[in-house]
Amino acid sequence: MFLFKEAGYQLFRNRGRTVLLCCISAVLCGCIAFYLGNIEANRQALNNLNESTPAVLHLTNMTMDSLDELNINTDRFDALCTLGLRSVTATSREKGCLETPYDYRNPEPGDTEVRGLSSLTAAGMDSEKYITYAPGMDRSFLEGEEPLCLLSEEYAKEHGFSLGDTVSLQLCQVAYDIYRAPVIRPISKEKTDLQVAGIFSRDSKPEVFANLYLPVKWVRSYAEQTGADFYYSSMSASLLDSRNLNAFKEKLKDMGYYQPIVMGIPTDKRPDLSVANTVFFEDQNFIRAAEKLGSAVRYYRFFLLPFFLVVIALITLAIFLVLRSTRRDMAIACSLGRPKGKTALGNLFAALSAQLVGCVLALPAILLLTGLSLQTALTVCGAFLLCALLGDLIGLSVLLRFDAMSLLIQSE
């Protein structure tokens, strides 16, 4: 109990010294907060990089001359999706026979250009400004498996369709031969009914043109029900975890996919230009950002121990300079028979109390300026107090290295 009273006496006896120690503590605690805050900010940015700048893959053929009009069978498509992909964008190409029945003798059967879409983005129409939907419908219908369709304004006017009407036509699948020439086969001999869920105008300027858009999931399901072949014509997606990019590329290699940098075209036979066996990655931005953030985190962590050693050294210096004027009082106490250990303990409690007050004063600024959570801010304060304890012990051990009588005689 006497030690606490002594600590209080030391604190209030020289208030200027106490205030100075509190200010020094607040500044050093803030420095630790900003240092650890930088580590945390870079680590969070690295973790969030997969959301802001993910690595994106595109399927293409061996000569990389197109990202569309390819043959991507359902087994390969499903196998890719199981590797860890998100935001999968896929299309298929079909022909519709609305007024003219399918005729295999016709080299280009069908009077309606049809595309299956996984989302509105797959058509290159990110904006819904020029699309009119039927009541209760929105862009999400393309992500479902219902027989709904989106018509072009010209096609709807030409054939007299409006929102909510039913379009009856025969669907044909468009696949490609080894030269990427279209091969058109009927999905079913019967017509299918599609409800008009929306109409888009020419001002929308879709990158993937068609008279009629369908949910690609429904087209695949319809083809599987009729026993017809189904192929996706394009596919792109973001990696679920772009940090595993290299491992993902190794899995692609095991699945028989080429990468552009190591691509080789067989010379003993003509390559099949319709097969989507090459993966093109848009990963430069992710790699550059990840390397920069990863390096920053590594550097900060590498210098973490030296940084704390510097903080301890500054605390030691501060304690030595602030309490240097109390050496005579320490010498008097020791000359009266009081052990140096108890004298040091009283001053240690006083110094730690002032440093704790400095932490409390710095805490609101840490929370406001660094964006750290309360738990992390309290951890910062704990780390500073641990450094303060070590610095105080070193500083006091240096201050107490004196002979009491010699120091008193010199001071006289």
Image (cartoon, rainbow, N blue to C red):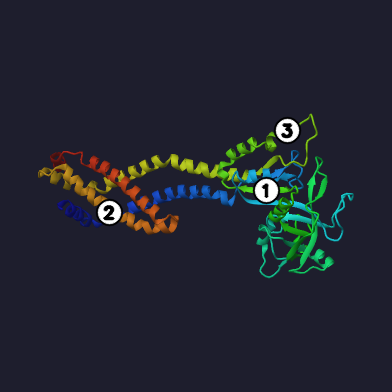
Judging depth in this view, the residue of 224 and 110 nearest the camera is: 224
Q: Quadrant of the C terminus?
A: top left
Q: Alpha-carbon distance for marks 1 and 2?
A: 60 Å
Q: Amino acid at mark 3?
A: Gly
Q: Residue at x 64, y 48 (%)?
A: 237
Q: Which mark is residue 354?
A: 2
Element on which disc 1 rests: strand
Q: Which mark is residue 236?
A: 1
Q: Alpha-carbon distance for marks 3 and 1?
A: 22 Å
Q: Alpha-carbon distance for marks 2 and 3?
A: 71 Å
Residue 155 in which image quadrant: bottom right
Q: Amino acid at mark 2?
A: Ala
Tag 3 residue: 264
Of label 3 and label 1, which has the lower sequence position? Answer: 1
- Tell which residue pokes out farthest to the top in this image: 268
x and y percent of residue 326 in the render?
A: 20, 48
Q: Is any atom of residue 11 visible in this view? A: yes
Of label 2 and label 3, which has the lower sequence position? Answer: 3
Q: Residue at x 64, y 36 (%)?
A: 253
